[in-house]
């Protein structure tokens, strides 16, 4: 065996991920999540103001707007191949759709859960953009809580 022969394999480099598509949708994703959270908070505020009166008289347009914003966000993440955060957003969208069908399920704690999950998704994606190693498992607690609330 000559000194130039080596039994060691050359180091394997990690594949480089193209973050261009994510960068392209990230600002719109932030806006969609912000709009969804604001709409849910508005609905909760209006519903709280109507307590003791007819809760059915509260306009549920805000809930439909929140669901639509979440739907757009899910589509954006699907388009750029962000599967794990996309699952979290899909759970948020499912929950918002349940609120549209039954507005009494939309409470302050439910809106706060969706907001917390949206912050976790944005934090995850920001880490991706910075090239930091960030496990999608960190999104699981919020995902689990969303699914539990959705039943």
Image (cartoon, rainbow, N blue to C red):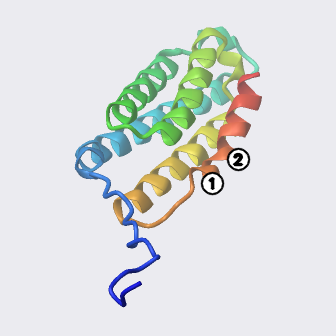
Q: Quadrant of the N terminus?
A: bottom left
Q: Residues within 10 Å of mark 1 (few under 14, many from 20)?
A: few
Q: What is the x, y in percent for residue 16? A: 31, 58
| Callout 2–callout 1 Cβ contact below 8 Å | yes
**Residue that label 1 marks:** 138
Say which element carries label 1. Answer: helix
Question: Whole-Å distance between the Cαs marked 2 and 1?
Answer: 7 Å
Location of mark 2 (residue): 141
Which residue is depicted at the point 58% across and 44% down?
A: 117
Q: In this view, which residue lies farthest toward the front? A: 1
Residue lying at 67% horizontally and 12% vertically, measured from the top left: 102
Up/down of 79 relative to 34, above or below: above
Q: Quadrant of residue 70?
A: top left
Hey, which quadrant is residue 113 in on the image?
Answer: top right
The residue at 42%/40% (across/down) is: 82
Q: Residue furthest bottom?
A: 3
């Amino acid at each position: 065996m000559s000194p130039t022969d080596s039994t060691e394999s050359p180091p394997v480099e990690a594949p480089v991920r193209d973050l261009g598509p994510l960068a392209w949708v990230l600002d719109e994703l932030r806006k969609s999540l912000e709009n969804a959270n604001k709409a849910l908070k508005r609905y909760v505020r209006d519903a709280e103001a109507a307590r003791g009166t007819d809760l059915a008289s509260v306009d549920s347009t805000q809930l439909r707007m929140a669901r639509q914003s979440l739907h757009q966000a899910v589509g954006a993440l699907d388009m750029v191949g962000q599967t794990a955060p996309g699952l979290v957003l899909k759970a948020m969208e499912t929950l918002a759709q349940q609120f549209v069908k039954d507005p009494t399920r939309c409470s302050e704690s439910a809106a706060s859960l969706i907001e917390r999950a949206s912050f976790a998704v944005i934090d995850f994606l920001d880490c991706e953009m910075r090239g930091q190693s960030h496990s999608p498992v960190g999104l699981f607690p919020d995902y689990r809580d969303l699914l539990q609330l959705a039943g």
